[in-house]
Structures are given as structure tokens and as C-alpha cells.
Image (cartoon, helix red, strand yellow):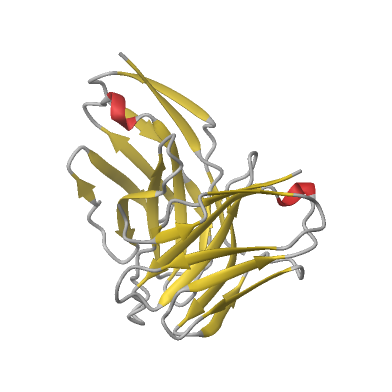
Amino acid sequence: DSGVTQTPKHLITATGQRVTLRCSPRSGDLSVYWYQQSLDQGLQFLIQYYNGEERAKGNILERFSAQQFPDLHSELNLSSLELGDSALYFCASSPQTGSGTDTQYFGPGTRLTVL
Amino acid sequence: AQTVTQSQPEMSVQEAETVTLSCTYDTSESDYYLFWYKQPPSRQMILVIRQEAYKQQNATENRFSVNFQKAAKSFSLKISDSQLGDAAMYFCAYRTNTGNQFYFGTGTSLTVIP
């Protein structure tokens, strides 16, 4: 158990809908990262937040957005869902001490299925 | 741009034997970090081992060790005395010292044969 929690574990929805994925980082970790893992692809970095502020952006679609709240939990919002958005979405957290040595600890993931 | 390549989509090893998973990366950076993550059927991503590029000594964690060749930009994972529980997808990952995102390879699926 990494200490990172993600809810829900599974989500089934229809095209065109909007969903919210939630992540709680390890206690004390300030950074949260979101990744997408499709069936035939590796992990794709989406976005990172550090202490409430966006820090880095990867291959995140405009239909997707995220935020980190004062209690450091984060939410990833996916809207106008398409079949291709079906994937496993991971959240990871790290202490972000600023030294660049941070290791990311992954949550169990949320399996999103778009029908 | 940084890229991470895992050229072995699938590997298999007999229980108790040793297996080496390959990873190469491309970067112009001199200071960075490399990781191996394990993803078992539960899909949880588990950190296996980490290597700092400035360290010449190869990292070791129990039965897991790496062969880090900085000049060749190679970072292979050796699993000794393979166990059934080692069966999983293994991902190699790269991170710069200053950047915040990880770059992952496409993974190697390891099967352990009893």
C-alpha cells in the first residue's frame, strides 16, 4: 500500500458525459501527478500540481482539467467523454522537496470505461 | 525530448533463474534519475528500484539490481532468483533533475514459469 488513495476504483459512463476522479496523496506529500494508461500504451503524463498550483503539463486534452485543493487532495475532471478516453487513470504523489530526487508513489488507479 | 525505450515487449524466466530487462533512453541532460516500476495484475504501480545518474555505483534492492551505463544511456534491470510473484509488467522511467514529469517506456511483460 503506497498511501495514495483514489476513488472510485471503477467508473462506467457514456460518451458525452463528465466525470470526476479523486486522489488523496500520501500524508505530507505536496505534489500530485495524474497519468493515463490506455490498453495499448504506456503511462502518459497528464498534469502535476504542487501545493495547490499547477506545476507541469503533459499530454492533457483541453476537455480534461484538474485542480489541487487546500487539503492537498486533487481531482481530475474529464468532460465530453469519448470512447478513446477509456483507460486506467493513475494519481501519484511525491514530497517535492525541491531537490529533484523525489520518487513518485502511485495510487491503485481508477478504471474508466466509456460506452 | 526525452524518450524511454523498452525493446522487449515480453520476457519469460524459469523460477529461481535470473532475467534481465532492457531499457534505453535518450536525453541531453547530464543529471537525471531512472526508475523501474512493477505493475502486477492488480495494476498497482510499485517502485522497484531507483538510480541517480550522478552515482556510478549500480543500485541494488535485494534480488533486484540495475546495470546503469550512462555513456550508452542504458539502464537494465536484473532480477535474481526469480519468484512467481515477480510476474508483472515492468516499466522503465526517466526523470530530469529539474523537470517534474516522468517519461515511461512501454513496458515489458515478465512471465515466471514454475
User: Relative to B13, does residue A57 appear above or below in the rendering?
Assistant: below
- Disc count in the image? 0
Q: Quadrant of residue B90?
A: top left
In the image: residue A11, left or right of residue B21: right
Task: Tell me the quarter of the image containing the C terminus of chain A.
Answer: top right
Residue A75 vs residue A53, the one in the foreground: A75
In the image: residue B86, left or right of residue A62: left
Q: Position of residue B104 (x, y in %)?
A: 52, 53
User: Relative to A42, does residue A56 appear above or below in the rendering?
Assistant: below
Q: Quadrant of residue A77?
A: bottom right
- Does residue B15 show up? yes
* Residue situated furthest left in the rendering: B62
Task: Give me the residue at 36% from left, 32% from top.
Answer: B20
Task: Give me the residue at 53% from left, 48% from top.
Answer: B105
Task: Give me the residue at 32% from left, 80% from top.
Answer: A97
Residue A44 vs residue B61, the one in the foreground: A44
Residue B108 vs residue B47, the one in the foreground: B47
Q: Position of residue B69 (x, y in %)?
A: 37, 50
Task: Give me the residue at 56% from left, 43% from top.
Answer: B106
In the image: residue A82, left or right of residue B105: right
Q: Position of residue A57 (x, y in %)?
A: 62, 73
Q: Position of residue A70 (x, y in %)?
A: 45, 86
Q: Quadrant of residue A64?
A: bottom right
- Does residue B22 show up? no
* Residue situated furthest top in the rendering: B114
